[in-house]
C-alpha cells in the first residue's frame, strides 16, 4: 500500500522516519519540498561532488577514484553539459522494517533535462540519501540547494522480509554526507 500524507506523518512521529521533517509542501519561489499527497519531496543539501575529467579518470564502481570529482559547498551547483554531480539529501531517513521506499525525480528538473537517479531505500536502511543529478543537455544546468530535488514514495509492506538492509550490514548503512560507490569486502 502506498502511504498517503496522513500516514507518512504518522510514520514520522512513530519511527522518526525523516529528520528534519517538513510537514507541509513548501512551494513559493522554490522547487517544492515537504509532504505531498502521496510522498515526500526531499531537499538537496549544499554539498556537491561535480564530475570532472581533468585527470582522464575512468569511472570504475569497483575502484572509484575521488579525483574524478571537484567538491563544492554552495547554494547552487552548475553541472557541465553531458555530465553529472553527486549530492545528498538534507533529510536523514530511518526506514522502518515494514516500509519500502522508491525515489523518483521531480518533473521540474526533468523538464530541464536534469535527471535524478531512481533508487530504493530498503527496510531498516538509514542515512542521508546520496543523489545523482545527470545533465543530459548541451548546456550547463543549475541545481538549487535547500530546495526540492526528488520525491520519495513510501510503501507499507504486507509481509516483513527475513533479512533487512540493517540485518545484512548493508554497505551504505548510516551514510553521512555524499557517499561515493563502495564494494562490500
Image (tube, rainbow, N blue to C red):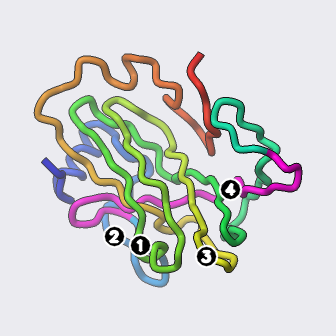
Provide the secondary structure element on which disc 4 rests: strand
Nearer the observer: mark 3 or 2; the answer is 3
| Left or right of 19 in this view: 157 | left
Provide the secondary structure element on which disc 2 rests: loop
Provide the secondary structure element on which disc 1 rests: loop
Image point (51%, 43%), residue name: 128
Which of the labelled discs sits on residue 48, or is there none?
4
Determine the image quadrant of residue 27: bottom left
- In the image, the segment drawn in magenta is 34-57
| Left or right of 26 in this view: 117 | right
Location of mark 2 (residue): 25
**Mark 3 vs 1, N-terminal side:** 1
Total residue callouts: 4
Location of mark 3 (residue): 137
Nearer the observer: mark 3 or 1; the answer is 3
Residue sitting farthest toward the right: 55
Image point (77%, 51%), residue name: 69
Residue 177 percent coordinates (x, y): 62, 43
Residue closer to the observer: 17 or 3: 3
Residue 55 percent coordinates (x, y): 88, 49
Nearer the observer: mark 4 or 1; the answer is 4
Residue 44 percent coordinates (x, y): 54, 59
Nearer the observer: mark 2 or 4; the answer is 4
Label 3 close to label 2 by CB (< 8 Å) = no
**Mark 1 vs 2, N-terminal side:** 2
Q: Is residue 182 above or below residue 69?
A: above
Q: Residues within 10 Å of mark 2 (few under 14, many from 20)?
A: some
**Mark 2 vs 4, N-terminal side:** 2
Q: Is residue 45 magenta?
A: yes
* Gap between marks 3 and 2 measured at Cα: 29 Å
Q: Residues within 10 Å of mark 3 (few under 14, many from 20)?
A: some
Which of the labelled discs sits on residue 32, or is there none?
1
Amino acid at each position: 500500500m502506498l502511504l498517503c500524507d496522513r500516514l507518512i506523518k504518522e510514520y514520522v512521529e512513530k519511527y522518526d522516519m525523516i529528520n528534519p521533517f517538513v510537514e507541509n509542501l513548501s512551494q513559493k519561489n522554490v522547487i517544492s519540498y515537504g509532504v505531498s499527497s502521496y510522498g515526500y519531496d526531499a531537499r538537496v543539501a549544499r554539498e556537491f561532488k561535480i564530475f570532472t575529467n581533468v585527470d582522464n579518470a575512468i569511472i570504475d564502481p569497483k575502484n572509484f577514484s575521488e579525483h574524478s570529482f571537484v567538491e563544492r559547498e554552495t547554494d547552487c551547483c552548475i553541472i557541465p553539459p553531458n555530465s553529472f554531480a553527486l549530492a545528498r539529501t538534507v533529510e536523514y531517513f530511518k526506514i522502518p522494517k515494514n516500509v519500502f521506499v522508491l525515489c523518483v525525480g521531480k518533473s521540474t528538473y526533468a523538464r530541464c533535462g536534469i535527471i535524478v537517479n531512481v533508487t530504493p531505500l530498503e527496510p531498516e536502511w538509514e542515512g542521508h540519501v546520496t543523489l545523482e543529478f545527470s545533465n543530459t543537455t548541451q548546456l550547463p544546468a543549475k541545481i538549487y540547494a535547500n530546495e526540492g530535488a526528488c520525491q520519495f514514495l513510501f510503501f507499507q509492506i504486507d509481509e516483513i522480509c527475513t533479512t533487512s538492509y540493517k540485518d545484512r550490514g548493508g554497505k551504505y548503512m548510516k551514510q553521512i554526507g555524499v557517499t561515493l560507490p563502495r564494494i562490500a569486502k
